[in-house]
Amino acid sequence: MAQINIVPYIDVMLVLLVIFLVTAPLLKQGVQVDLPKAPAKPIQGIKNGAEPLVVTIDSQGAFFVNQGAPPTQPLDKAALRQIVGEVLKKNPHLSVLVRGDDHVDYGRVIQAMAILQLAGADKVGLITAPLPAKR
């Protein structure tokens, strides 16, 4: 009577187990952060009663600013930095907010925040939409 030799299958299984044990720790990347699990509260008061400087990033990654340029005109990085720098020179305590599209690459939002920092913004906030009301 012929029997199936299972030793090669066990060898393959052990090799796969070793591969998974070695690669599993490598898959954990980045710094652990605790993200908020509740909706953000709205901003209570704007400094000096002035409208905040809002930089918008649309789904294609184009930058727009609500002050210093037409709000529907897309800007490149250099123009964004120049316009924000000029606005912040006139009003250095102006609140600066970033409004990024839900589908835009996270790296593009970080680029905008870095440009804002180089232009002189000390603190940059992120605008989010409120959670839908539960029924």
Image (cartoon, rainbow, N blue to C red):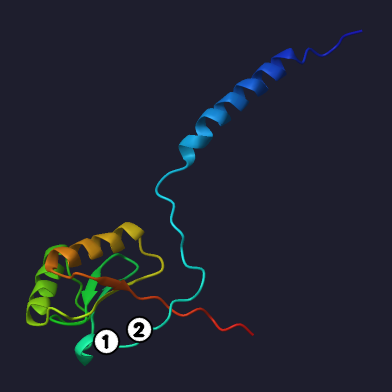
Q: In which quarter of the image is residue 5?
A: top right
Q: Which residue is drawn at 35% across and 60% down?
A: 106
Query: Mark 1 to mark 2: distance in Å?
Result: 7 Å
Quadrant where the image shows the N terminus: top right
| Label 1 packing within 10 angstroms: few (<14), some (14-19), many (20+) | few
Write the residue at 73% across / 13% down. Answer: 7
Give the label on residue 109, or none.
Answer: none
Q: Are marks 1 and 2 in contact (CB under 8 Å)?
A: yes
Where, quadrant-wise, is the C terminus in this rendering?
Answer: bottom right
Question: Does 114 sit above or below residue 99?
Answer: above
Most extreme residue toward the right, as rendered?
1
Viewer-nearest residue: 113 or 73? 113
**Looking at the image, residue 134 lies above or below residue 31:** below
Residue kind at label 2, given as amino acid type? Ile
Classify residue 83 by image quadrant. bottom left
Element carrying mark 2: loop
- Badge count: 2
Residue 119, x across and y down, in percent? 13, 67
In the picture of the structure, the residue carrying the numbered disc 1 is 46
Q: Which of 105 and 27 is in front in this view?
A: 27
Above-or-below relation of 42 to 74: below
Q: Position of residue 131 (x, y in %)?
A: 51, 78
Residue shown at 39% from the left, 83% from the top: 42
Left or right: where 10 falls relative to 70: right
Q: What residue type is labelled 1?
A: Ile
Residue at the spot 24% in from the left edge and 65% down from the top edge: 113
SS assignment at label 1: loop
Q: Residue 101: x percent and y percent?
A: 37, 70
- Outermost residue on the bottom side: it is 49
58 lies left or right of 11: left
Q: Where is residue 25 in the image (x, y as percent from the top left)?
A: 50, 36
Task: Residue 43: give its label.
Answer: 2
